[in-house]
Image (cartoon, helix red, strand yellow):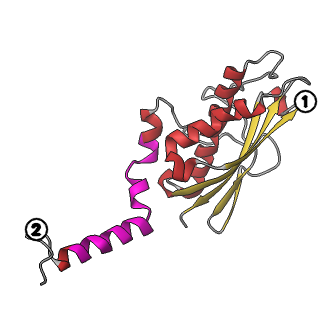
Amino acid sequence: TFQISPFLSIDTVMMHSVAARVAKKSNFAARCVHIEARIASLGYKLPNEPPAPKGNYMGYTKRGNTIYTAGHLPQKHDGTLVLGRLGENVTVEQGQDAARVAALNILATVKSAVGDLDKVKKIVKITGFVNSASDFTNQPAVLNGCSDLLGEIFGVEIGRHARSALGVNVLPLGVAVEIEAIIEVDA
């Protein structure tokens, strides 16, 4: 064994190099925190079950390693919905809270699809619909409630995503927001 220094040999350097490549390949560094524990540490609670669809459709479709969620409503743990229209009777802050609730519901759906949120490799895209008064133009700020939460939970590498924030004049059941997601997962 060739000595590089009094403390390192070629064998030691090679071993660390291989370990670094394996850790990088498996995304080990990003997986050191269990996602559900992270959600709890941030003061949020994941729903035990994803909310049931409100119509004749599935909550998600999985193709290969990609999950496409249906639009998720801001349904709280007690079953109530966050209702209202931004710029009329809902503030931006209340809209952000509604977007966080919808995001947690999306994560409950993903967990039901793959069994473990640690299998999430990338939040690819979020599309959010904001129930908006005709002169309300701050939809991106409302959707930051969802985007910021996903970033806090998964970190920048996994949680940062492409996004569309759309203002609409009405949403199903009068909810304030509806959000859908495209998420890449481990097989």
Picture quadrant of residue 175? top right
- Relative horizontal placement of residue 30, taking residue 148 as reference (left or right): left
Label disc, if present, on residue 148 of the rendered structure: none
**Amino acid type shown at disc 1:** Asn
Of the numbered discs 2 and 1, the one sitting upstream in the chain is 2
Residue 100 point in image, percent of width and height: 62, 33
Q: Is residue 2 above or below residue 183?
A: below
Category of crowding for the residue at label 2, using alpha-carbon neighbours closer than 10 angstroms: few (below 14), some (14–19), many (at least 20):
few
Q: Residue at x 80, y 15 (%)?
A: 89
Q: Give the secondary structure at mark 1.
A: loop
Instruction: Tell me, yes or no, whether the highlighted magenta stretch contains residue 172.
Output: no
Which region shows up in magenta? 13-37
Residue 11 point in image, percent of width and height: 19, 79
- Which residue occupies the extreme top position in the image? 89
- Relative horizontal placement of residue 128, taking residue 124 as reference (left or right): right
Nearer the observer, 80 or 45: 45
Picture quadrant of residue 41? top left
Mark 2 lies on residue: 7
Nearer the observer, 83 or 183: 183
Residue 173 point in image, percent of width and height: 83, 29
- Image quarter where the N terminus lies is bottom left
**Amino acid type shown at disc 2:** Phe
Q: Is residue 64 above or below residue 115?
A: below
Q: Residue at x 39, y 60 (%)?
A: 28
Q: Main secondary structure of the magenta part?
A: helix
Mark 1 lies on residue: 169
Q: Residue at x 59, y 37 (%)?
A: 148
- Which residue occupies the extreme bottom position in the image? 1
Q: How many marks?
A: 2
- Relative horizontal placement of residue 72, taking residue 152 as reference (left or right): right
